[in-house]
Image: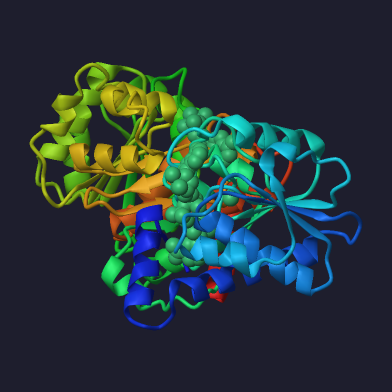
């Protein structure tokens, strides 16, 4: 159930089902309308009639069907039409199927209603909402009435989650077969309320043809690839992670990341420290090892000689030129590294010269993982960031492909993208993560999982999910330092679930 379907892919699922003779279009609509009516029965109190706002397309068709089922269940219903369905369509059949009162949308006012079903526009939303529809949506939003959206809140793009003009704020959305990216990407997600997934008789086998490449980031996506130590493991065979420390006044971020890499299961973690920061780092680490590194060559030989399998550069690192030297040296050499994570200053170092990173000589065994927040993304991919008509998923995929990297595009709706077009949207995040240093911990978890040999896309997805789960477990008052300590409980719960 973790596949996400764009509106086009959903229309294809619909067509494949109809062509296979499994169901006709109206039967799918009857099932969709039934699911909406069931949700309304559960959600709306029996006080006041239910207003069903119906558009001219199939979304409106679902609305008329739901309205009729609610009538048959004894509920008082009035449909408000935003335009007649075209003759011969399933939506027209649905309008005929409904035997109750229909009024013009222009006559709608929320006062006196017990709840609203929003069936104006769904997957077919083609332009910004205006006119009587926009007035009705604004009136519903101001009324505080409970609202169920059919498929998606009208005004929210199923593909990108963008609001086109104005959008209805729903308490719940009933969608069909699989969620759409717009249910998870902001700002759309904030308009959906609780998303119910209804089975309307489309078989899972249609996915074999559609082959969706975007997913909700759920453990099923990566659980099988999560490393677990072999019975004969020793510390270096479990994976050795190295984290570059910043200068003396800026060492905490790297230590947070190093601790996270260790709690993610790396058997050994070493902080690579400049000479001036050795004493302050030494005063703060116990299980984490420490190594003085003065030059990129020092770091490179350490990685090679001590079998470091993944490295992280960026948290609190400072100097852009040292960052570039270290990164380009590590990436170019055959040194046994299987992953290099760049965060924060490791990304900013390539501002105004991203082609130096993208065109760098690369050891093919080492996967690059970039973990930008919004601002860092813009520094590395300014043209992609400013493209107004791309979804966050499309932006992340394009950037991952250009950089030949796995990319974690952070935020309330973090998107993880691979250079082959796969993308996962994270949905278990919490604003508690908006605290200084939490990104450093995330980068450390990615590095720790890569060090253990987990494939990079899955490692990135797992890291984002467990990072958020750790925050949820801690609750209020969270600071970044608390996150690594929550990881053992997260791993235990995942092991039980798996
Ligand atoms: N694809 C499927 O598998 C199924 C789809 N169903 C329903 O069908 C919906 C999609 O139906 P449609 O493709 O007919 O699309 P919609 O019903 O979402 O809207 C299409 C109509 O509205 C017009 N329109 C779009 N945006 C507008 C705007 N801002 N202002 C004014 N007019 C606008 C379009 O020109 C078109 O006439 C789904 O959201 C879902 O509710 C369900 O019946 C079940 C099965
Ligand atoms: N409102 C939010 N909801 C969910 N996650 C959030 C939110 N704000 C920030 N985060 C997450 O918190 C982390 C912050 O990382 P970052 O911006 O790099 O912070 P820092 O540089 O302080 O470590 C990211 O993983 C991001 O996805
Ligand atoms: K809708």
Q: Position of residue 244 (x, y in %)?
A: 34, 33
Nearer to us in this view, 458 or 416: 416
Q: Is residue 230 above or below residue 59?
A: below
Residue 282 in view, yes or no: no
Residue extending furthest toward the front? 87
- 144 vs 310, left or right, is right
For image coordinates 79% across by 38% down, the residue present is 109
Instruction: Give the number of marks.
Output: 0
Nearer to us in this view, 1 or 37: 37
Q: Is residue 53 above or below residue 384?
A: below
- 431 vs 178, left or right, is right
Q: Is residue 33 above or below residue 435?
A: below
For image coordinates 17% across by 46% down, the residue present is 304
Residue 352 in view, yes or no: yes
Nearer to us in this view, 380 or 183: 183
- 124 vs 364, left or right, is right
Q: Position of residue 211 (x, y in %)?
A: 29, 66
For image coordinates 79% across by 61% down, the residue present is 43
Q: Quadrant of residue 174?
A: bottom right
- 293 vs 469, left or right, is left
Nearer to us in this view, 83 or 426: 83
Q: Position of residue 251 (x, y in %)?
A: 46, 26
For image coordinates 84% across by 61% down, the residue present is 76
Q: Is residue 332 above or below residue 378?
A: below
Q: Position of residue 306 (x, y in %)?
A: 23, 49
What coloring was used for the rendering? rainbow
């Amino acid at each position: 159930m973790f596949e996400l379907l764009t509106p086009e892919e959903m229309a294809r699922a619909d067509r494949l089902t109809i062509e296979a003779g499994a169901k006709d279009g109206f039967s799918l609509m009857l099932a969709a309308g039934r699911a909406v009516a069931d949700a309304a029965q559960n959600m709306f109190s029996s006080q006041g009639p239910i207003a069903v706002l119906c558009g001219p397309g199939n979304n409106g068709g679902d609305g008329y069907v739901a309205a009729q089922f609610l009538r048959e269940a004894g509920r008082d219903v009035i449909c408000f039409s935003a335009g007649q369905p075209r003759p011969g369509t399933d939506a027209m059949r649905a309008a005929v199927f409904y035997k109750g009162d229909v009024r013009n949308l222009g006559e709608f006012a929320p006062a006196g209603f017990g709840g609203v079903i929003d069936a104006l526009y769904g997957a077919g939303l083609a332009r910004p909402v205006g006119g009587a529809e926009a007035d009705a949506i604004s009136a519903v939003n101001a009324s505080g009435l409970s609202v169920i959206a059919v498929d998606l809140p009208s005004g929210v793009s199923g593909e990108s989650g963008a609001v086109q003009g104005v959008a209805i704020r729903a308490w719940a959305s009933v969608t069909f077969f699989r969620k759409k990216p717009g249910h998870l990407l902001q700002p759309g997600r904030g308009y959906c309320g609780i998303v119910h997934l209804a089975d309307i008789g489309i078989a899972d086998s249609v996915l074999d043809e559609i082959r969706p490449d975007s997913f909700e980031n759920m453990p099923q996506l990566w659980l099988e690839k999560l490393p677990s130590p072999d019975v004969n493991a020793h510390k270096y065979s479990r994976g050795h992670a190295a984290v570059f420390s910043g200068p003396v006044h800026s060492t905490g971020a790297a230590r947070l990341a190093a601790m996270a890499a260790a709690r993610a299961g790396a058997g050994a973690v070493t902080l690579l420290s400049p000479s001036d920061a050795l004493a302050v780092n030494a005063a703060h680490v116990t299980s984490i090892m420490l190594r003085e590194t003065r030059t990129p060559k020092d770091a490179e030989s350490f990685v090679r000689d001590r079998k470091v399998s993944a490295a992280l550069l960026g948290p609190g690192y400072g100097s852009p030129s040292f960052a570039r030297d270290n990164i380009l040296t590590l990436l170019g050499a055959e040194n046994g590294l299987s992953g290099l994570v760049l965060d924060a200053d490791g990304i900013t170092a390539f501002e105004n010269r991203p082609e130096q990173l993208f065109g760098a000589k690369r050891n093919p065994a080492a996967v690059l993982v970039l973990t930008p927040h919004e601002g860092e993304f813009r520094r590395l991919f300014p043209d992609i960031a400013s493209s107004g008509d791309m979804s966050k998923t499309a932006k992340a995929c394009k950037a991952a492909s250009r950089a030949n990297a796995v990319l974690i595009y952070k935020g309330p709706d973090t998107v993880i993208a691979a250079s082959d077009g796969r993308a996962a949207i994270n949905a278990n995040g919490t604003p508690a993560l908006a605290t200084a240093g939490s990104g450093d911990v995330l980068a450390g978890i990615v590095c720790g999982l890569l060090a253990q040999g987990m494939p990079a896309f899955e490692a990135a997805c797992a890291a984002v999910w467990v990072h958020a789960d750790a925050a949820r477990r801690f609750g209020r008052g969270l600071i970044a330092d608390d996150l690594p300590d929550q990881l053992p409980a997260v791993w235990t719960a995942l092991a039980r679930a798996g």
